[in-house]
């Protein structure tokens, strides 16, 4: 949670830009049949935007980003030309508290009834009344392996079900020659290192994050890259053999490798120590010029048929339980996509961190990436 002084500083930084944008555009913006969506890369099924445009006559401009930090930087700078953004739940919590999102008109979202009550309850910690965000897809951050290459280098006794495989130099060193990929996000990478250090992943103690930093420094010589999107193709192409991966991305890489005729075996593991669970959220920036069209898009995405399209293509679980009868049974029965209850007991919803701690993490992360 932000401190009151931090919140005042952030609100002051963005209020002028938001106010100016509203004054310039509100008189006529919602009459326009246009919509500007800003989403994670590889985070919408092909054909979805075309379907929305055909049904509504609303022309969509669709842009992408790779990390939550990129989105947050633009929101804090007062970028109000976006009508829909898709932050992860922990970033959503900070951005909502800073006044960066518009309150939703829930009467214009009749398809909210399709949402999974368990997911709705899970994210209430960040938005108790569900007035500022709507859950989209969710997933788990775990470990993806090219088993063929990993076993060749690390042997059959390698702890594949543990964060030790990437965060213990003993094992990470064995995989340097075939490639290790970590997520290109400071907050996520440090939380993963907390799991690797056997510390509480919900900690806000700076000392614990110093321990995580030392853990990361110890394995830095063996890390090939930091990536939140290109690692999918790298896994599928055999350019890396181990990656901190989002569950759906790991399945996409597996399918891409199979389609390319690759003979190696890709698998996804939820480590025994636990793993982060995240939920991507639809939100409308406070200064969005086309809020009415944004509401139409969110309600469209909450339809069972449209939501099923996302899971069938992205391999991420949908937050719309009404979509499940329309999801490919092979996906519904894949434990790497829809984990069984015993695995779900080990996951932890990503929590927001104080802004002062996040700043320190980001500074440390940039130095880590630079090899300093």
Image (spheres, rainbow, N blue to C red):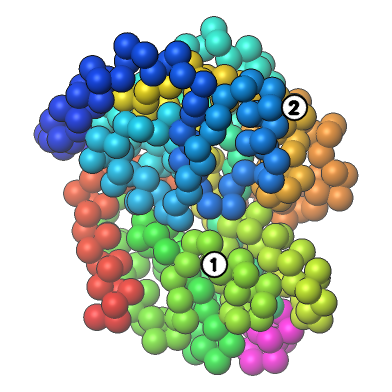
Above or below — where is 353 with respect to 99? Answer: below
Q: How busy is the neighbourhood of tag 2: few (under 14 within 10 Å), some, or many (20 plus)?
A: many
Q: Which residues are magenta?
A: 147-158
Give whichever of 264, 345 is nearer the camera. Answer: 264
Please tell me whether mark 2 sits on a helix, a strand or a loop.
helix
Q: Is residue 190 left or right of residue 59?
A: left
Position of residue 52 measured from the top left corner of the image (x, y, whole percent): 65, 28
Residue receiving disc 1: 230
Please tell me whether mark 1 sits on a helix, a strand or a loop.
loop
Q: How busy is the neighbourhood of tag 1: few (under 14 within 10 Å), some, or many (20 plus)?
A: few
Above or below — where is 239 with respect to 251? Answer: below
At 46% from the left and 19% from the top, the residue drawn is 32
Q: Quadrant of the N terminus?
A: top left
Residue receiving disc 2: 304
Point out the residue furthest to the top here.
Answer: 107
Question: Is residue 152 one of those drawn in magenta?
Answer: yes
């Amino acid at each position: 949670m932000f401190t009151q002084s931090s919140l005042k500083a952030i609100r002051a930084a963005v209020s002028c830009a938001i106010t100016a944008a509203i004054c310039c555009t509100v008189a006529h913006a919602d009459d326009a049949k246009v919509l500007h969506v800003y989403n994670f890369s590889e985070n919408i099924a092909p054909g979805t935007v075309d379907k929305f445009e055909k049904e509504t006559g609303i022309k969509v401009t669709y842009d992408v980003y790779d990390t939550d930090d990129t989105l947050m930087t633009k929101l804090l700078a007062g970028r109000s030309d976006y009508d829909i953004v898709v932050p992860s739940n922990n970033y959503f919590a900070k951005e909502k508290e800073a006044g960066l999102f518009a309150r939703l008109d829930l009467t214009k979202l009749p398809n909210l009834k399709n949402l999974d009550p368990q997911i709705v309850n899970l994210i209430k910690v960040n938005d108790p009344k569900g007035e500022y965000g709507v859950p989209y897809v969710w997933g788990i951050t775990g470990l993806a392996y090219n088993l063929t290459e990993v076993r060749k280098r690390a042997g059959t006794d390698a702890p594949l079900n543990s964060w030790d495989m990437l965060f213990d130099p003993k094992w990470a060193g064995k995989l340097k020659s075939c490639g290790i990929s970590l997520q290109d996000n400071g907050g996520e990478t440090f939380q993963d290192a907390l799991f690797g250090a056997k510390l509480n992943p919900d900690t806000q103690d700076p000392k614990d994050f110093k321990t995580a930093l030392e853990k990361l420094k110890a394995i830095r010589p063996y890390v090939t890259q930091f990536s939140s999107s290109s690692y999918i193709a790298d896994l599928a192409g055999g350019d890396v053999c181990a990656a901190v991966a989002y569950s759906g991305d790991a399945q996409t890489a597996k399918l891409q490798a199979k389609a390319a005729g690759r003979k190696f075996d890709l698998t996804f593991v939820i480590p025994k120590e636990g793993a982060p669970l995240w939920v991507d959220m639809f939100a409308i920036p406070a200064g969005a010029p086309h809020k009415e069209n944004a509401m139409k898009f969110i309600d469209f995405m909450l339809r069972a048929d449209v939501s099923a399209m996302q899971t069938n293509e992205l391999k991420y679980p949908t937050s719309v339980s009404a979509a499940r009868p329309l999801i490919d049974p092979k996906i519904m029965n894949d434990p790497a996509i829809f984990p069984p209850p015993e695995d779900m007991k080990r996951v932890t919803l990503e929590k927001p961190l104080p802004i002062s701690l996040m700043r320190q993490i980001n500074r440390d992360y940039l130095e880590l990436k630079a090899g300093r």
